[in-house]
Image: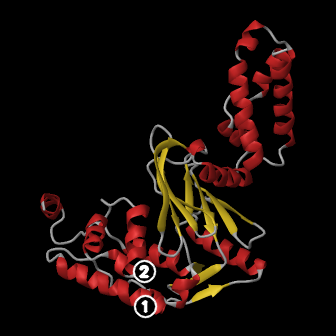
Amino acid sequence: MLIDAILLISYPFTVLRIYQLIRFLQDSNPQNTPVRLAFYNYLKSEVDGNEPLSQKLLEDFFGQCLEYPHWLANKNHLGREVLHILQNMNSFFVHQSFDFKNLRFPQDMQVFEMENPKDILQASERYIETLCGNLDKYRIVSDTSKRCYGLIARTDRSCEIHQLDRKFTLRDGLLQPLRKDIILYYDSDFNLKQDVVQCCEIAPYLLCYFKLTNKSLVSGSLLRGYVFQKLSEFTAIPINQCGRLEEYVRRLEMIFFEKNETLLQSTPGLSSETLDLTEAPDQKSMSNQGEFENLISQAERALKTSFQEDKNLSQLVERFKTYVQSSTQ
C-alpha cells in the first residue's frame, strides 16, 4: 500500500500507526468476538488514526474496559485476546512492530472499588498531586455519587479538569484511578483547548470523545456500553448543538470557574449592559425584539441545565421577558 510505503520510508522498521491496527482488526471480522469489537470500536472513535500506537493508548483502553462489570468479570479473556491480536499484528507487519513487553494486561491488574467518600477524596488528591509541577495549583471536589473532579491550574494559566471515580488500581506501586483519560483541557482564557482529544463521561457508561477546531466547532462521537458502540456522531458543529455534552461541560465550569465568565460564554449578549435597554425602550430596542427572544431562549436553556440555582440569571430572564411582552403591546 502506498501509505504504508511512505510511512516505512519516514519511520523505518519502528513505528506502527493506529490506523494500521484498525485496518488489521477490520480485516479479521471484529464482530466475531466482543473483545475484538470493543477494541475496534474504541480505536475508531477515540483517537487520531495517524498517531503512533502507544502503550498509553492500550492502558487507557484496558482502564475503560474494566470500568464495566462484564469486562471486570472476564478480564483474563480480555487480556489474552488482546495479546493475541497484538502478536498477530506484529507478525503481519514484518518491518514494523509494537513493543508491548512492559504493558500490564487486564489479567495482571488489581482493581479496588472504594466505598468511603473520604478515602476516595484522599486517594484522588494524592493522584492529582503527582500530576502537578512545583508551581501548579489544584482543587478537588466531590459529588453525591462518590465521584471526584480535580482541577489543575498550570503556571502557563492553562487548566485541566480530571474526572476521578471510585475504582483504583496499582501502577508502579502507586494507587491511581483506573481510568486516567477522562479529562477536559482548557486554554489560558478558560476556553476548551483546540485540536486536543477531549474525553468526558456525560452519563453512566456513556463516553464522549471530541475535538474543537480553530473555529470553535466540535467533532466527535458518543460511545455506549462495554463494546463502545457508537451511539451518535457529530462533525464541525457548535457545542450548543450537542445538548448533553454542553450540559456536562457547563456543570463542571460552574464548579471551578467564575460563574459570570461561564455565563457570558453560555449566553453571549445577555448582560447588564443589554439590560439597560429594558429601562428606556426606544425604537432601536423595539427592532431588536427577535434578538432578545433568542437571548431569552438561550438563557432559559442555561437555567434548565447548568444554572438551576442562579437567581440573578433567573431575575434577568424575567425582566427581559417582561420587556419583550410590553414592547409588543
Residue drawn at 16 percent across, 72 percent down: 13
Question: 151 or 84: nearer the eye?
Answer: 84
Q: Quadrant of residue 32?
A: bottom left
Residue 150 screen position, x and y as percent: 66, 64
The quadrant the N terminus occupies is bottom left
Whether residue 306 is visible here, answered yes or no, is no
Tell me if mark 1 has few (under 14), some (14-19) or many (20+) residues whose alpha carbon lies within 10 angstroms of its own: some
Relative to 3, residue 194 above or below: above
> Image height check: is 187 above or below 289?
below
Q: In this view of the protein, which residue sits in the foreground, 81 or 28? A: 28
Residue that mark 1 sits on = 77
Q: Is residue 91 above or below residue 306?
A: below
Which quadrant: the C terminus? top right
From the top left corner, tell me how far across and down residue 203 is, in percent.
64, 64
Most distant residue in the top direction = 283
Give the residue type at disc 1. Answer: His
Quarter of the rendering containing residue 267: top right
Classify residue 314 as left or right of residue 99: right
Comparing labels 2 and 1, the label whose residue is closer to the camera: 2
Q: Where in the figure is residue 323, as x and y percent of width and height? A: 84, 21
Label 1 SS = helix
Q: Judging from the image, what secondary structure is the residue with disc 2 in?
A: helix
Other-residue count near label 2 (Cα within 10 Å), few / some / many at <14 / 14–19 / ≥20 = some
Residue beneath the point at 82% across and 15% down: 327
> What mark, if any, has residue 34 been given in the picture?
2
What is the CA distance from the residue labelled 2 to the residue labelled 1?
10 Å
Whichever of callouts 2 and 1 sits on the residue coming sooner in the sequence is 2
Residue closer to the observer: 294 or 58: 294
| Residue 25 left/right relative to 259 | left
Q: What's the image's color scheme?
A: secondary structure
The residue type indicated by label 2 comes to Pro
The total of numbered circles placed on residues is 2
